[in-house]
């Protein structure tokens, strides 16, 4: 079995432990191939086209580099400039939230714990947006 096949099986098994509907048939339907084709991908007897690999990466929330074994990190790392940008954005969001008079949720004042939870969620959104927007940056301007 090749690296791609091993990682597909491992990811599916991990997802199946969380949600039993993640069968080979379920994933095959999500990516638009026959179950036997997806089985061949997991067994390493067939290589998926790049378009299909991209769909698989989206389903599992990992990078294509991870699927191919080029990295052990499932999520792309951010450059130091991107990390600084994210930190600045998060600081601005925090200031905006804290500067609001009577910030509340369903009429109740927002507790410090709720604010931290909200900030964690906002950080996730900012990071996801940054990842999504990467593919729209011309290659000559991307960090190497």
Image (cartoon, grey):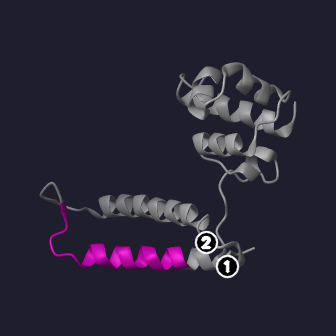
In this orientation, which residue lies closer to the viewer: 116 or 1? 1
Query: Circle 2 sits in a helix, a strand or a loop, which is it?
Result: loop
Quarter-of-image position of residue 16: top right
Quote the CA–CA distance across marks 2 and 1: 7 Å
Query: Circle 1 sits in a helix, a strand or a loop, which is it?
Result: helix
Q: How many marks?
A: 2
Q: Is residue 114 left or right of residue 100?
A: right
In this orientation, which residue lies closer to the viewer: 48 or 5? 48
Residue 7: image x %, image y %? Answer: 76, 37
Residue 93 is a magenta residue: yes
Quarter-of-image position of residue 47: top right
At horizontal 47% and vertical 65% (from top left) the residue drawn is: 126
The numbered disc on residue 104 is none
The numbered disc on residue 137 is 2
Q: Look at the image and give the residue range highlighted in magenta.
A: 85-104
Crowd tier of the residue under label 1, counting other residues whose Cα lies within 10 Å: few below 14, some 14–19, many 20 or above: few
Q: Which residue is mark 1?
A: 141
Residue 122 is a magenta residue: no
Residue 52: image x %, image y %? Answer: 68, 40
Q: Is residue 58 above or below residue 110?
A: above
Residue 3: image x %, image y %? Answer: 84, 39
At horizontal 69% and vertical 44% (from top left) the residue drawn is: 51
Quadrant occupied by the C terminus: bottom right
Residue 65: image x %, image y %? Answer: 76, 52
Whether pointer 2 and pointer 1 mark residues with C-beta atoms closer than 8 Å, the reply is yes
At horizontal 66% and vertical 46% (from top left) the residue drawn is: 54
Q: Is residue 19 left or right of residue 116?
A: right
SS assignment for the magenta stretch, majority: helix
Quadrant occupied by the N terminus: top right
Quarter-of-image position of residue 91: bottom left
């Amino acid at each position: 079995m090749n690296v791609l096949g091993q990682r597909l099986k491992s990811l599916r098994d991990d997802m199946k432990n969380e949600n039993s509907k993640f069968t080979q048939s379920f994933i095959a339907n999500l990516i638009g191939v026959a179950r036997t084709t997806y089985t061949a991908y997991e067994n390493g007897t067939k290589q998926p086209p790049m378009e299909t690999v991209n769909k698989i990466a989206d389903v599992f929330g990992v990078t294509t580099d991870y699927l191919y074994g080029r990295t052990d990190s499932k999520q792309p790392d951010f450059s130091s400039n991107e990390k600084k940008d994210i930190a600045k954005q998060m600081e601005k969001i925090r200031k905006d939230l804290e500067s609001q008079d009577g910030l509340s949720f369903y009429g109740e004042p927002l507790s410090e714990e709720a604010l931290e939870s909200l900030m964690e969620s906002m950080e996730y959104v900012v990071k996801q947006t940054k990842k999504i927007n990467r593919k729209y940056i011309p290659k000559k301007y991307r960090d190497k």
